[in-house]
Image (cartoon, rainbow, N blue to C red):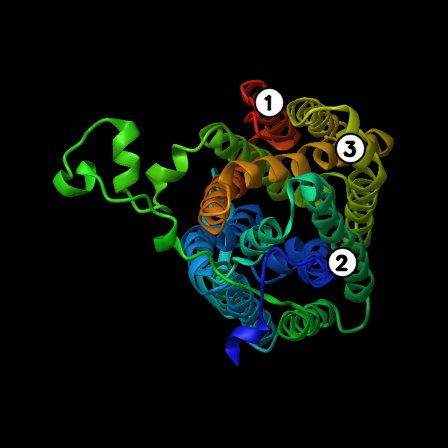
Amino acid sequence: MKEKTIADPSENISITPLLAVNFVGALGFGIVVPFLVTLVTKWGGNAVVYAVIAASYPFFQLFGAPILGKMSDRIGRRKVLLYSQLGTLASWGIFLIAFALPVRVLASFSDSFIGDFAITLPLLVLFFARAADGLTGGNVSVSNAYLADITGEENRSKNYGQMAISMNLGYVAGPALGGILGATLFGEVIPVFAAFVISAAALFIIQLGLKEIAPVKIENTLETPNACHVFGHEHKRSYKLHCEKPDSIGAMLALPNLTGLLTINFLVMLGFSFFYAAFPIHAIQSLSWTSLDLGLYLAVLSIIMVIVQGPLLARATKILSDRVLMISGSIVLCLGFAALISENTAVIYLGAVLIAVGNGLMWPTFMSVLSKSAGKQMQGAVQGFAGSAGAAASIVGLIVGGIAYITLGATIFLVAAFVILIVSGVALLYSPAKNN
C-alpha cells in the first residue's frame, strides 16, 4: 500500500507544490524582516544583538541541514520536508510567546566596541525561536534536491529559475505585508501571527500536494568489492574514493568543480549576510527610514529579481554559458552593493536594481550547476553540505557585519562588494563537464 504513494522520478511530476512551499516559506520570513530591528531594539538589544539573533538561524542550520539532506537521500524528500516545516511552524509559535512575556532585564552590557544593550526575557525566547527554526531548517536544501530528482538536464536551469522566482515572490509580498501589518494598532504581533498561519499552510501543501520520490538505494550503486576494500590501506586518491561512504565529505569534494562551487556558495552567502546584517540598521538609523519604507524597498528589489529570473534568465541561458552568467551576474551584484554606500535614495534604489539583476542571473545558474555536479547519488548530501557552508558564511557575515557596522558604517557595503568580486574570479575557474 505504501509503495503506491511513491512516485518514480522519471514521471512527469509537477513542481507547482514545491514552488508553493518555497513561496509561502519566503513570505512567512519576509513578513518579519522590516520590523525585526525595531523589535530587537524595543526589547533591549542593539545592532550586535540583532546580528546574533539573525545568525542563530544559520548557526543551528549548520548542524541541521546536512543531517536532513542525507536523511532525505535515505527516507525520502517529502518526509523530511514535513519534519522541517513542522519545526518552522513550532518556531513561529515560540516567537508569539515572546510577546506575552514581560521585558525583564536579565543582564546589561556597556562597551565601546559592541555598544550598550540589555538581555531581556523576550530576547532570549526570540533567540530560541530562531535557533529551533534553524535546527530544522532543511527546507531549501531538500527542496533543491527534490527538484534535481525530478528535473532533466534540458529543464534544469529553467526549473531552478522558477524556484528562485517563487521564493522572490514571497519576498515581494512578505516585507510589504509586514510593513503594513506592523503599522496597525497591534504592532508586530500581527505579522508574526500571519507568519505562523502561513507556515501552517506550507505544511498543508507538503502533506497533500507533494509526491514522495523513492530514495536512491545507495548500496545498489556501489562498485564491486576490490583490493581496496580488502586491505583498506590504499593511499592513492583514485582508489580511496571507492572505499569511502558515497555521501562522505571526501567523496563529495572529489566531484568535478565541487570545491570551487562550494567556495562560490560560501562567498555569496557571506556578502549577502553583510548586507542583511547592516542594511536594515543603516536604513532605520542613518537614513531615517520607517519599517514600511524598508519593507517597500525590499519588495521592489524582489520584484525586479522575479522579472530577471523569469523572461530575462530564460533568454540569457539560450545565448550565454553557465560560466558567463555566473561571472557577469557576480560583477553586476558587486556594483549593486557598492551603490549602497550613497545616502541618495535614487542611488540606493539603483543599487537594488543592480543587486536584483546580478543575483537574478547568477544564483539560479549557480544552483543549476551545483545540481549537475552532484549527480543523482549524492544530490541530498551535496545540497545539505552546501546549505551548511552557506550557513557558516551567514553566521560569520551576520555577526561580523553587525559589529563592523558600529565602526565602519556604510563602508561595510564596500566589503560586501569586494567579497562578491572574488566570486567572479572563482567562477572563471569553472569548466563544465563534457556531458553537460
In this rendering, the answer to whether 257 lies above or below 122 is above
Is 220 or 309 nearer to us in this picture? 220
- Secondary-structure class at tag 3: helix
Q: Which residue carries the number 3 mark?
A: 357
Q: Quadrant of residue 88?
A: bottom right
Q: Position of residue 405 (x, y in %)?
A: 58, 36
Q: Residue at x 56, y 66 (%)?
A: 78
Label 2 crowding class (10 Å Cα cut-off): few <14, some 14-19, many 20+? many
| Residue sitting at the far front | 224
Q: Residue at x 61, y 74 (%)?
A: 96
Q: Which residue carries the number 1 mark?
A: 418
Confirm whether residue 271 shows in the render: yes
Q: Earlier in the sequence, mark 3 or mark 1?
A: 3
Q: Amino acid at mark 2?
A: Gly
Q: Amino acid at mark 3?
A: Val
Q: Position of residue 111 (x, y in %)?
A: 45, 43
Confirm whether residue 387 shows in the render: no
Q: Residue at x 50, y 68 (%)?
A: 125
- CA distance separating discs 3 and 2: 20 Å
Label 1 crowding class (10 Å Cα cut-off): few <14, some 14-19, many 20+? some
How many discs mark residues in the rendered view?
3
Q: Are circles 2 and 1 on residues that touch, CB within 8 Å?
A: no
Q: Which residue carries the number 2 mark?
A: 174
- Secondary-structure class at tag 2: helix
